[in-house]
Structure formats: C-alpha cells, structure tokens
Image: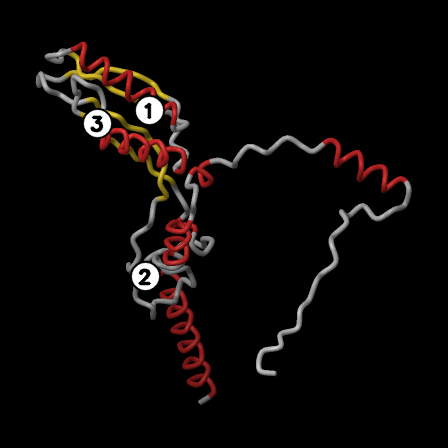
Amino acid sequence: MTSTRTSLTAAALALAALGLAACASGGPSVHAITPGAQFGLKVEPGTERIALAPHADGLSDAQRGALAALAARSVQADGGVVTISLPHGAADAAATARAADAAQLALNAAGARVLRSTYESDDPKAPLLVSFEYQTAAVPHCGRWDDLTATFDNGAYANFGCAVNANMATQIAHPSDIAHPRAEDAPDSERRLTVLEKYREGKVTAADEPPLRTTISHIGE
C-alpha cells in the first residue's frame, strides 16, 4: 500500500513538472522591454511646396501673400532654408528670372533664408517651385491588441504604451527636439558674478521678488 502511494506521488510530481515546463516554453516569446519602448518617439522628413507662375509684371498680390505665409510656416517649423527652383528651359527665361528675384526679395523680407536651384521640365510654362524641408513627429498607429489572457511570459503587450506616445507626438511643438536637443543660450556672466558675490558675503543668492498683492472681492455685498 505504501509502495503504491509513493508511486502515485512521484507520478503527480512528474506531471506537475511537465506542466510547468510547458507553461514556460509555450506561446510566443516576449522579451522584457520598457513599457512603450517599441513606440519610441521618432521624426520623419516632410516637404512643403508651392508653385508660382511667372508673370511679366512680377509677382501678384496673391503670390506675395503665399510667399509670406510660406516663410512664416518655415520659421515656425524650424525648416531651415527656403529653396526657389527655377525650371530649366522655360519659354521666357528672363521673366522666370525676374519672378525668382522678386520671390527671393519677398522671402528675405519675411525673415527666411533662401537658396536657389534649377529643375528639369519639358513644359515651357513650368512654374517656380518654392519649398522648404522640415521634420514632423511620427505618430504610431495603435490598436494592435494581443490576447490579454496570454500572461504566461509576463511580458508587455504589443500595444502597451502606444496611446501615450501617440498623444505626445501630436502635442510636440518642435519635432526637431526629438532628434537632438536645442543649443543652450549663452550664460549670463553678470548674474553669475552677482550670485558669487552674495554667496561669499553670506547673503541670499536668490533674486528679489516683488511682494504679492492680494485683493478682496466685494461682489455680493
């Protein structure tokens, strides 16, 4: 009787061990990762471009307005230089060159840096192409859910952290901050000397703040 009970106990332990081994090796392998790391913030290149038809009498009011708006967007997007591309082989090369000169003056007046280039076109009436390149935040596509009951690997789900980083990507004002940090401003040497002098004299180094002014509302009296 004792021998039979011992055999049953050994068999039960063997089955339990096999079950644990199956749980450890079954299902897809999920490596331990930082939550949301698979949806890390990234930047993608983008290009904004407008086309201007050359006129014999220069730029129209609508074209000047379009150039001013483009220059403003370039500054806002940290787009760098604005490129004016002239069509090679235009029917009226002189008019195209005058339009490019006028466009460059308008862009410079709006605070944009300008670079000129050419492009090939078979159309004798091909327009001027004014463009700038910028960086935009890449928004991940969420909604890829796995089986939430598959917890044997104790790993992160494929969609975990996607919504958080997608919201961050849509709210970043300057996507170039994702790729590299901004340059620091020059230090205030005068303020630094003032702080050091106060520190050596044992004084408070913080800047003086004006006293708070409070007002009492008399509404309802």
Residue drawn at point x = 77 percent, y = 49 percent: 208
Q: Nearer the viewer, mark 1 or mark 2?
A: 1
Task: Using a 10 Å C-alpha cutoff, classify the residue at mark 1 as few (fewer than 14 neighbours), some (14 to 19) or many (20 or more).
Answer: some
| Left or right: where 216 falls relative to 160 | right
Gap in Å between the C-alphas at discs 2 and 3?
67 Å
Q: Nearer the viewer, mark 3 or mark 1?
A: 3
Disc 1 on helix, strand or loop?
helix
Q: Position of residue 79 (x, y in %)?
A: 38, 31
Residue drawn at point x = 28 percent, y = 16 percent: 101
Up/down of 75 relative to 159, above or below: above
How is the model colour-coded?
A: secondary structure
Residue with the mark numbered 2: 27
In the foreground, 37 or 120: 120
Residue with the mark numbered 3: 60
Residue 106: numbered disc: 1
- Farthest residue in the bottom direction? 1
Gap in Å between the C-alphas at discs 3 and 1?
12 Å
Q: Label 3 amino acid?
A: Ser
Q: Looking at the image, do the residues carrying marks 3 and 1 touch, with CB atoms under 8 Å apart?
A: no
Q: Position of residue 203 (x, y in %)?
A: 87, 46
Compare marks 1 and 2 and give the one earlier in the sequence. 2
